[in-house]
Image: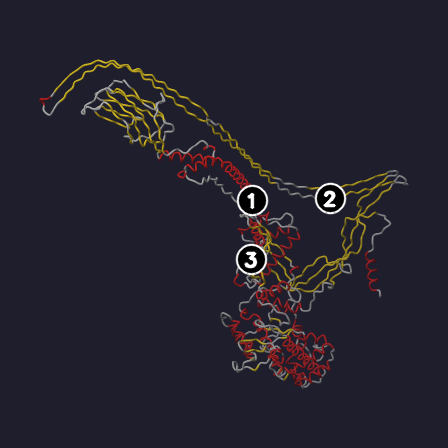
Amino acid sequence: MAEDGQTPLFDFMMVRAPASPGDAVLARHYIFNDFLMPDQPMKTNVPKKPGLADVSAVAGLVFKLVSAAPGDDPYADLLAELVRFMPAWTFDRQAAPDAQQLTLEVLEHNRFLRRDVRYHLIPEQLTDVAADLVPALVRALDALDAGRTRFDRGRLVARLEKIFNGALVAVVFDQGGHQQAYRQARWALFDALYLLFVLRRWVPVNLERILAGLRGLHAIEALAVDQLYARVLAGKAAPAEVFLLGRIAPRYPGLRDWDGRSPAAGFPLVADGADLAELLAATPVIHPIFARLHRYLRPFNDIKPIGVGDLKVVRQTLTAYRPGEISHIHNVLKGETRLRDHRKLEKVEDVFSFTGTESAERTSESQSTERFEVKQEAEGVVRTTLGVTANANLSYSNDAAHITASAGAGFAYNRNTEDHTKLAQSFARDVVAKAVSRIESRATTTRSVTRLTETEETNSQNFNNVKGDGHISGMYRWIDKEYTAQLYNYGKRLMFEFQVPEPAAFWIAARLESHTVELDVPQLPAKPKPDRPELGFTWQQVDEPLLVKLRGRYEGLRDVTFPARTRVVVLRDVDSRERQFAEQGIDKPNYSHSYNCQVDRAAGYEITEVVRTGYAEFYHRASEANPNRLGIYLNDRLIHSDAGYPYTYDLNGNGPPAEPIVFSEDDLPLRFDFSGPQHINLYRLQLTLHLGLTAEALQRFQLMVHGVVLAAEEKRLEAANQEREAAYRSAVEEYHGRLAELEHLLVRDVIRGGAEAANRAVMDEEVKKHCLTMLTKEFDTVPGDDRLADRDAMGRVEVRTRPTRFEITGIDTDRTAAGFVPADRQVWYPAADLEAARDKGPAVQFLEQSFEWSRMSYLFYPYFWAARPRWLELMSRSDEADPNFTAFLRSGMARVLLAVTPGYEGAVLHYLATGDVWNGGPSPVIGDPLFVPLHAEIREQTDDRLGGTAEGEPWTYVVPTSLVYLHGSQDQLPDLVAERAARAGSAAAPG
């Protein structure tokens, strides 16, 4: 609040077209190079044809190069031509004999543009301008500056005439109009201004002295016109002077309709020091081609200001507190006591919770049986043989005469009893195992959003009217505030208007992209691969040493031994348990006898050698032609045979069996067969077998051992595999749950704004970016012409650092150590690119400061101004808490009103015309038909926020409040007007 108690209520702009400055203002405040085209009106300075070459070498060159087709670098061609108009200096006369010798003293006191070995002097000083009047003009500027503060027309004119060595009228005018020397000085100064204005693209220049020279000539011309006008008005002018005044009258608005007798309007032109100051502050006007150069035919930006905005502020002052309507009444009867307690409590709490549980049960059952079985089988066979025999013997020699034949008959009765007993024992194990695996996966997700708002208000009032004389009524009234408001005008602003499409588009895209990057999108968990047992050996590698190791680790192999490669077994009769197989007194022909033998763990072995010990005896010898025969069979396979005619056979010997024999079980039937013409009497025989383990049996054993180990390892890993499988199923369920949550995520939930102030900042920033796009042609769909957005002022530098960190060493050794150790590391530091920052920084600073971004106004147009395919998307956007932000989100087009910061009007107009930032200092006005009126409209305005001009009459309004006042109270409401007056008087009192 200000000292006067006023506070700004709100600001607003009233936009209007710029007012025409009028001919009198143009003649006083602006300097036109009208000598170039005398037939043109002074205030436009837009030539109808390129005629500048006749009077200005620089102007003619610029017109020539701009009108020609630009090359790859038109600026370089222009600079090469312009340096010809600048004096050349050099340190090396041999390399540049056409240049003047340059010394350090000359270099320090002047500004140069260097090209190769030549230094071209920049003509910033008036003494660098080649014109006859310029030396006198330099001295005249001091006299004019002194006359501005201590104005005395007579003394000023006399001093100037002494400097120019003649009357001012004669210095400026001749019979045909302006003196040739005066025109030449104006031409030369404008030519220097054009040269400097173009050179500023390559080197900083100072226009002040050249501008001061043009303003000095402008003021001298005004004093000369006043001198001529005064002589004619006083009747002291010669006829030639009267003729001259009539000739130049069309150039000055006050003289156009002058009757020659009464004083002319607006004259004299220099009535006092203020008039002289205005003339010395006049602004030269240059043709737009010098500012735009090759952009003259294709302007950088064709945006034009819409006009002038008057900044108006409504300021309010609190003037009084007024009792208003009745708020409430407390009635207390006589003799009554009342106690009133009032308590108000508001509490809001929202909680959202989600819990998910998963259970799974798996049952597996395996069963085996332990049992002992005895299998006995008895077989009794009674064989009765009744034999009736008839035989015939025939013997022959080599001839038929010696054939002898004999015949015989016989009867035989034989009874034989055979008992066979079989015993089989087997042992097996039954195991019943039932495993119940219960997997319970409990996933609990609790999301708690608690919003607690608690307001408690307790009021206690005690009303006591016991000793009162009557009933009491306490009346409470609302208090109203009375304000006095006043409208103030704080000056004019140059206003721009923009129509920007979909102002929220980029912010929404950035918000969605940011949310996508930060979003924890669940990924489908990989199905776990069950652990496969790694035995460390193959079945082919199972041997006896390995089996010894495995027996200590695996219970299933505790009683397993490695099968012997070879074995020696002596056959026994299972029934008699005798090693010797013997019978005597048999006396039978063609006799056969079987024995039941058994070899422990014989399966898988083959007989490699049979060792026989014993003999057999027949009753009689046999003939060689009809020998006695003996066959020994194991498992119905012949292992030995013998045939001969002795009656006694020696069976001692050894050798492989006649046929290969491989055991498939432990039972081994043994049979002796005797045949031949003679009866067998007796035999005594003992058999020893040499057995060898077959490759197939060894392979089956190795596979068995490998299988037992593999089964044990698989069983050991089964629990871990089941646990991983359960965890996988739980993760899959969680994955689908998270996907279901994400599927309910809406765009409007992501782009919803925040607090109202934060939303306002977002809208301001986005609208500002769109305005800058319109002004600078940056950030648009054509990146090729971007000069700021693509220029990165930040780079990076590689730095070798030695950070100290805690490190643990020796983890896999017998000693673990830890400590803080330095470690070399190459990192990249962000660093400013000074060259890029120097190029980009001034433009950014200019654009930030040259507009009143904080006072920007905008209006959001509806969604249907966007492309039709986007209507549904725009309509679905909303922010329930902030309707203004909803309008921003849905907007298809926005209208923006933007004011130029006071003092930056010329620089902004220059930027729009050229695309270049004005580097500071006084600048001429570009002679655009719109720019000159805008410049004239704003040049006299200020932005004094503490002052301002009151407009209209103040008005009073009342604002209700929540305060209450007891009617009839002894304490009166404060008199704010009286208090403010007392404070003002106290502040004004001396001491």
The answer to whether any part of residue 266 appears in the image is no
Viewer-nearest residue: 398 or 373? 398
Badge 2 element:
strand
Query: Could you tell me residue 305's position as x and y percent?
Result: 61, 64
Q: CA distance from mark 3 to mark 1?
A: 41 Å
Residue type for callout 1 = Leu
Residue type for callout 3 = Arg
Badge 1 element:
helix
Q: CA distance from mark 3 to mark 2?
A: 57 Å
Badge 3 element:
strand
Q: Earlier in the sequence, mark 3 or mark 1?
A: 1
Q: Earlier in the sequence, mark 2 or mark 1?
A: 2
Query: Could you tell me residue 988's position as x and y percent?
Result: 83, 64
Relative to 280, 480 lies left or right: right
Label annotation for residue 455: 2
Viewer-nearest residue: 973 or 799? 799
From this view, report whether residue 826 is shown above or below residue 715: below
The quarter of the picture where residue 460 lies is: top right
**Where, quadrant-wise, is the N terminus in this rendering?**
bottom right
Viewer-nearest residue: 835 or 68? 835
Identify the residue shown where x is 53% and y is 67%. Answer: 298
Mark 3 vs mark 1: in front: 3
Q: Which residue is mark 1?
A: 742
From this view, report whether residue 493 is shown above or below residue 455: below
Q: Earlier in the sequence, mark 3 or mark 2?
A: 2
Viewer-nearest residue: 531 or 47? 531
Q: Which residue is mark 3?
A: 825
Relative to 916, 373 lies left or right: left
Q: Label 1 neighbourhood size at 10 Å, few (<14), some (14-19), many (20+)?
A: some
